[in-house]
Image: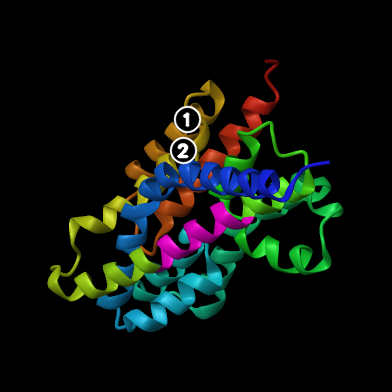
Amino acid sequence: MPTISHMTRTTTTGGLRAARDTIPVALSIAPFALVVGATGTQLGVPPLADMAAAATVFAGAAHFAPLTMFAAGAGVLAALGAAVLINARLLLYSTALEPRFRGQPRWFRWLGPALLIDQTYLMVLARDDLDDPARFRRYWLVGGGLLLSSWVALVGLGGVLGPFLPAGSPLDAAGVVVLAGMLGPRLTAVRPLLVALTALLVATAAAPLPGGVGLIAGIAAGIAAGALLDRVPS
């Protein structure tokens, strides 16, 4: 029977492993978080309000696209429709992760999905040692919690820096960087790399389009590339 000290060491090790895996992923989303915060401030959104939205939405593209669409004169329904379209992929992620949540406590089944984004999904997918429900729960909460905290803080930092940047700053184009970082935990694998590069190239080419359309086009291209690659035998 495991001793209390052994269980404590195991818990600490699991938390440190999640924190270690989160660091490069957090760095990969940092440019996009700064862009979201800076864009929000330039559009008149107070940094604290933008941070609250970042914590609530916790989805960079779904946060950024409505901001830019509003700036381009799009209506509320169009902006919300874009956000829903962008986040539709999370339904696929939740289906894939359902077995991991099935045996969890009720509180975790209610709160855990709030941390589901591309990065947390792929961090879990990259590991083969999370079959134990408690270990998965610990990894998910530590990794997702750190990503959420860093995202909100960086959006706030971008909001503080926003007033010091010229309108239409070239930083706006850096939003596409997140499409490469989106698959950070598995960029050494060929298929995720191809998906990320497809999304990045399309988003970069479509960057001059108004209203965040370029970012949406990049995401759609990445999804299409992933669907096509799934049909190709390994």
For image coordinates 61% across by 64% down, the residue present is 84
7 or 156: nearer the eye?
Answer: 7
Query: Can you say whether 5 is above or below 73 in the image?
Result: above
Residue 127: x %, y % from top left: 63, 34
Residue indicated by mark 1 = 187
For image coordinates 70% across by 68% down, the residue present is 111
Quick check: 65 left or right of 39?
Answer: right
Is 148 contained in the magenta span? yes
84 or 143: nearer the eye?
Answer: 143
Residue 106: x %, y % from top left: 83, 67
Magenta segment's dominant SS is: helix
Q: Quadrant of the C terminus?
A: top right
Residue 155: x %, y % from top left: 35, 67
Is 63 contained in the magenta span? no
Place residue 87 in its image quadrant: bottom right
Residue 164: x %, y % from top left: 13, 72
- Which disc, if any, is residue 54? none
Query: Can you say whether 131 is above or below 217 in the image?
Result: above
Disc 1 residue type? Leu
147 or 65: nearer the eye?
Answer: 147
Residue indicated by mark 2 = 184
Quick check: 230 left or right of 30?
Answer: right
C-alpha distance separating marks 1 and 2 = 5 Å
Disc 2 residue type? Gly
Is mark 1 in CB contact (under 8 Å) with mark 2? yes
Tally of numbered tags: 2
For image coordinates 84% across by 41% down, the residue present is 1
For image coordinates 42% across by 52% down, the residue present is 215
Q: Which residues are magenta?
A: 141-152
- Can you see residue 158? yes
Quick check: 18 left or right of 73?
Answer: right
* Secondary structure category for the residue under label 1: loop
